[in-house]
């Protein structure tokens, strides 16, 4: 295609992709050309008759697939935010093809011979610290991709990786289909208890639509007084991916687990958890389990106490039913109102999407000296917004936010990049959320926390100062990557930020002091529920990948939950058929624990600011930028955190922050 915008130079501001020119039909030929170019580059490096050096081997691989990186980043962004049948068909074709290309390159014996020779003789070269780090990571990447296996082992591992790519795509598309295809039309009689903003969000031409968008189903469970409808919604929400038929994910999960185990054993590890954790901060499954069980014991006790209180509210309502999963959120909101004289509906008008975006920007200005200039450019979707990020007059990068739920958009929230930072090249970063659209869009406090979380990831990209893409931005250990995002959440709760940016959408008045006091006092409310649902999911993930994999994941999930004493009325945050974190790809597989591992650090890191008496302490902010947000993976995470804090943390600050120390 001679006019394919993916294969031409762009004249757009800051080299932002020309989204108004890109069509789905452009991607197949663009991937063909990009894969050919990447293969040619690798072949040229492998055939180089000169002795391997960092420059003629590693640097060539680092920048030799720029076109492929560009095409893939745009495609996967669109696949996650506005999928349709054409994109899904292309995704199914591309997933095994991309996996095959990765195996082909990382198992190439001539290429590996150069990397291995360079690594074996690394002390002979005058490598800068970042170069030495990148070389170590490249050598490790080749080894873990099977380059050191015999021919039969390499072939089998390549086949496994292609099949895993196919299965991950199927898992994602099945889950999206279940979420997209389920809805119930309600009448006005079905809306009792629902706040006005939720009613407005659900309004359609033929009534009110209850969907499985998290921005709809969760507030519905928190407010609806129609118990039968809560049960219907809760069961549909928790059954995603397990409804039988072509979108059922249970067999998909079982095959993924079996193939991961075989992959790990081919590479010399006892099981997949041992393989996965070998390169993480945690190192071993035992270390992960120790942290999770320490927190679990306290959270389970708190949740048990909370459940008795909620049963008391049910009885006070004159009801004779037990506390079920579809009851917990409603009665928890009532209990919070009793304990803290707190009404979530009264809070929401102060949390506009625009106000919370400005709050996130304001914190980054105070900590890191950033400013944001709105851009009027073509973007992936009409709902998206873009800003140029500046430090003084210096261009730092481009930030794109796509915040509203819609059909074809994967559920949840995430950060990704359309271009990585590398040397003088500045990044283009996206945040994607699934908030309910409104005029204006009003957020819950949890929504605002999610916005801050994802913006923390974006800052990890935007502030990056690495030379090589391998170690720029969020290219760090999985159990370190959530530190910058979770740490950033803490500044949302700072009173001066809330007083400035939490303003009533009609009057513009700041949040009243008494309401602010109630909000902050109630921050640890419900942590028994939140911690139990999370840790249960993390323990199931760990059990799945430790030892022999289960042939029946649902039975294995039930065994884990019974062993740890899972409260009957609390579901896992992500039950197996919808656990996209660990089954849509390898990212968080045997690694869902990493949110809590990082939380140990983020709680301790924010305590470092609090200890100075200033949550925006300039000296601490400078160290935070230098060692956490800007350093990427240029040094091992333990070194970076210790350079920032002076020591590694224990779990005390985490337990205190979650209100689990009593």
Image (cartoon, grey):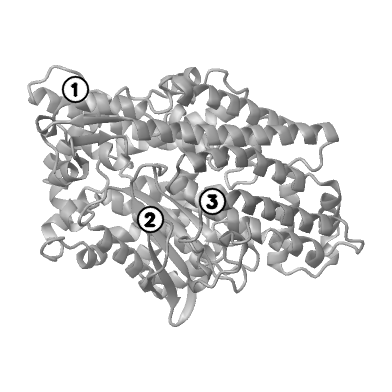
Q: Which residue is mark 3?
A: 75
Labels 3 and 1 touching (C-beta < 8 A): no
Report the mark closest to the observer, 2 or 1: 2
Left or right of 192 in this view: 397 = right
Q: Which residue is mark 1?
A: 228
| Above or below: residue 127 compared with residue 179 | below
Task: Specify the quadrant that holds the N terminus.
Answer: bottom right
Residue 567 visible within the image: yes
| Above or below: residue 185 compared with residue 108 | above
**Viewer-closest of 406 and 362:** 406
**Viewer-closest of 511 and 217:** 217
**Based on the displayed image, in which of its 4 quarters is residue 571 positioned?**
top left
Q: Position of residue 309 (x, y in %)?
A: 18, 29
Labels 2 and 3 touching (C-beta < 8 A): no
The residue lying furthest to the bottom in this view is: 393
Q: Which residue is mark 2?
A: 402
Q: Position of residue 366 (x, y in %)?
A: 36, 73
Q: Residue at x 32, y 39 (%)?
A: 213
């Amino acid at each position: 295609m001679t006019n394919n915008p993916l294969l031409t130079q762009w004249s757009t501001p800051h080299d932002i992709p020309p989204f108004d020119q890109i069509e789905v039909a452009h991607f197949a030929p663009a991937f063909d050309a990009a894969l050919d170019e990447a293969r040619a580059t690798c072949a040229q490096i492998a055939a180089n008759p000169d002795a391997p050096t960092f420059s003629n081997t590693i640097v060539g691989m680092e920048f030799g697939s720029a076109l492929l990186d560009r095409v893939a980043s745009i495609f996967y962004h669109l696949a996650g935010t506005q999928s349709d049948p054409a994109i899904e068909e292309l995704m199914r074709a591309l997933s095994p093809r991309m996996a095959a290309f990765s195996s082909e390159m990382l198992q190439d014996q001539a290429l590996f011979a150069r990397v291995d020779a360079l690594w074996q003789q690394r002390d002979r070269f005058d490598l800068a610290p970042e170069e030495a780090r990148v070389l170590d990571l490249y050598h490790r990447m080749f080894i873990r991709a099977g380059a050191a296996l015999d021919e039969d082992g390499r072939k089998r591992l390549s086949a496994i990786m292609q099949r895993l790519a196919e299965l991950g795509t199927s898992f994602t598309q099945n889950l999206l289909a279940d979420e997209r295809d389920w809805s119930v039309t309600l009448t006005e009689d079905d809306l009792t208890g629902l706040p006005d903003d939720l009613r407005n969000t659900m309004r359609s031409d033929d009534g009110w639509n209850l969907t499985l968008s998290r921005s709809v189903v969760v507030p519905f469970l928190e407010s609806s007084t129609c118990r039968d409808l809560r049960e219907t919604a809760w069961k549909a929400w928790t059954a995603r991916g397990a409804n039988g038929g072509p979108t059922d994910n249970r067999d998909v999960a079982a095959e993924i687990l079996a193939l991961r185990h075989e992959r790990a054993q081919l590479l010399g590890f006892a099981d997949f958890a041992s393989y996965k954790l070998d390169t993480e901060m945690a190192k071993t499954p035992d270390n992960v389990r120790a942290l999770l069980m320490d927190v679990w014991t306290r959270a389970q006790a708190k949740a048990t106490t909370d459940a008795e209180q909620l049963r008391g509210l049910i009885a006070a309502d004159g009801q004779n039913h037990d506390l079920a999963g579809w009851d917990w959120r409603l009665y928890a909101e009532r209990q919070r109102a009793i304990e803290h004289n707190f009404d979530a509906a009264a809070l929401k008008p102060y949390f506009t999407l625009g106000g919370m975006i400005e709050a996130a920007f304001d914190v980054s200005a105070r900590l890191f000296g950033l400013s944001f200039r709105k851009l009027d450019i073509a973007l992936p979707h009409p709902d998206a917004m873009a800003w140029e990020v500046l430090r003084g007059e210096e261009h730092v990068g481009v930030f794109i936010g796509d915040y509203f739920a819609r059909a074809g958009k994967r559920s949840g929230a995430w950060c990704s990049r359309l271009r990585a930072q590398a040397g003088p090249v500045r990044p283009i970063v996206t945040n994607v959320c699934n908030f309910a659209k409104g005029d204006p869009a009003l957020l819950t406090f949890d929504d605002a926390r999610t916005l801050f979380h994802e913006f923390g990831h974006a800052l990890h990209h935007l502030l990056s100062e690495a030379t090589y893409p391998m170690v720029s931005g969020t290219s760090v250990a999985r159990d370190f990557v959530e530190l910058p995002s979770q740490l950033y959440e803490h500044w949302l709760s700072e009173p001066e930020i809330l007083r400035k940016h939490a303003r009533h959408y009609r009057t513009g008045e700041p949040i009243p002091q008494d309401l602010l006091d109630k909000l902050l006092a109630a921050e640890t409310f419900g942590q028994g529920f939140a911690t139990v649902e999370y840790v249960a999911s993390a323990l199931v993930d760990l059990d799945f990948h430790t030892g022999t994999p289960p042939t029946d994941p649902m039975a294995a999930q039930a065994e884990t939950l019974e062993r740890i004493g899972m409260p009957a009325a609390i579901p896992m945050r992500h039950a197996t058929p919808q656990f996209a974190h660990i089954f849509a790809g390898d990212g968080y597989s045997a690694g869902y624990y990493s949110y809590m591992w990082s939380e140990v650090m983020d709680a301790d890191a924010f305590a470092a600011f609090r200890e100075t008496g200033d949550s925006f302490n300039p000296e601490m902010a400078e160290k935070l930028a230098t060692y956490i947000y800007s350093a990427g993976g240029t040094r091992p995470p333990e070194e970076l955190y210790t350079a920032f804090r002076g020591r590694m943390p224990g779990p005390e600050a985490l337990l205190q922050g979650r209100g689990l120390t009593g």
